[in-house]
Amino acid sequence: MQSTTTPDVAAADEIAALNVTISPVEKFQEYLATKGKRLTTERAIIVEEVFAGHDHFDAEHLVARLSSRKEGRSVSRSTVYRTLTWLEEAGLLRKVARTNDREVYEHDYGYPQHDHLICKQCGELIEFRNQAISDILDQIANQHNFRMEGHRLEVYGRCEKCCRPAQRRPGKLNMI
Amino acid sequence: MQSTTTPDVAAADEIAALNVTISPVEKFQEYLATKGKRLTTERAIIVEEVFAGHDHFDAEHLVARLSSRKEGRSVSRSTVYRTLTWLEEAGLLRKVARTNDREVYEHDYGYPQHDHLICKQCGELIEFRNQAISDILDQIANQHNFRMEGHRLEVYGRCEKCCRPAQRRPGKLNMI
DNA sequence: GTTATTGCAAACCATTTGCAAGTGT
DNA sequence: ACACTTGCAAATGGTTTGCAATAAC
């Protein structure tokens, strides 16, 4: 998993408040149907694994967790990649960053809109939410007669820990 | 080159107004010096080529323009890639998007801060500037004791042309 | 003369794809 | 039966890197 700072408690409440009427699997099922595709065992397994927590993750993480599972069927790398693509199209996931040359995904269904501060040193993703930015983007898109479908905002820099001149070993997991 | 919509005329004025005291090459030279690196002929050629216009471009574009030049020395693919990395670190360029699996660069020196609307259908990059967003980001970074060094905001969707139901052949250059 | 740099070709590596065997309806 | 899927292994393709020859100071 990606090291992650989860937002404040208020966020958790809001998540609960979101009117998630159907489960991720059902939602995916629904999307697949519109494309004449099927909800196979493998696809269901992947969706369940992905929505078991709400951490950020990349394809490799998923492959690692699914390709060697003891209980139940295991899922191949190709299928993971193929399914991630459908999940993104279905609006269940979105790519939010690129770390260590890998696309990082996170939930886009049943989870409030937000963006990230990304630490160049330790790679930590810090979530933040800001309605004003979304509003401004709507407005800008309108001005340009642009039909906005989504956005990706990555703020780069150094996180609090990595800024403090070496005390108790700041993170130095990845990146330069 | 990348298909690009240049900002309004006011922007051009503002560019001129920016107090660019030293040329990109000099600025690069300066940075290289701090790293004990040298400003070689190849590096100068690359910087000049890159700052000849202010279009968006990717490594491949540059390689194409520089590896087969008749006049003057030609520059190899490796050197182009290596130099792009230094130029980014030097603050002369920044990566603004990823199109067709390639990183897209643009000037970050002598050019006002802005972001882009990216058409998923034709790949066009439409620039827009908005001070409010920058201000909000400053504020958010502060709240998290995050030392912001830059950001990358990509707004995805369909551009005006590609939204209009097929009249005079909308762009369909790349992407899906 | 050192030390950094270039160019070439080979290596990398995340992601994609062809294809034969398998599965859902 | 028929179309969609899977898994494997091989291919892709942008980017990086090892290394011997070359250039900058």
Image (cartoon, coloured by chain):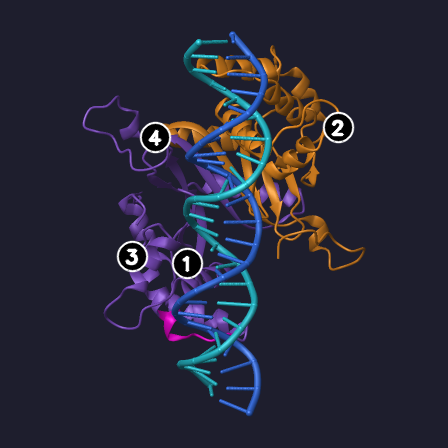
Chain colours: A purple, B orange, C cyan, D blue
Identified by mark 3, the residue type is Gly
Identified by mark 2, the residue type is Lys
Q: Secondary structure at mark 4?
A: helix
Residue occupied by mark 2: B70
Q: Is residue A166 magenta?
A: no
Residue occupied by mark 1: A109
Instruction: For marks 3 and 4, give the CA distance.
Output: 26 Å
Q: In the image, which residues are magenta?
A: A37-44
Report in which chain the residue with disc 3 lies.
Answer: A
Q: In this rendering, would A81 be left or right of B171?
A: left
- Along the line of sight, the residue nearer the viewer: B24 or A26: B24
Residue occupied by mark 4: B143
Instruction: For marks 1 and 4, give the CA distance.
Output: 27 Å
Report in which chain the residue with disc 4 lies.
Answer: B
Asked if residue B29 is positioned above or below residue A34 in the image, the reply reads above
Identified by mark 4, the residue type is Gln
Asked if residue A99 is positioned above or below residue B129 in the image, the reply reads below
Instruction: For marks 2 and 1, give the CA distance.
Output: 54 Å
Q: Residues within 10 Å of mark 4 (few under 14, many from 20)?
A: few
Q: Nearer the viewer, mark 3 or mark 4?
A: 3
Residue occupied by mark 3: A53
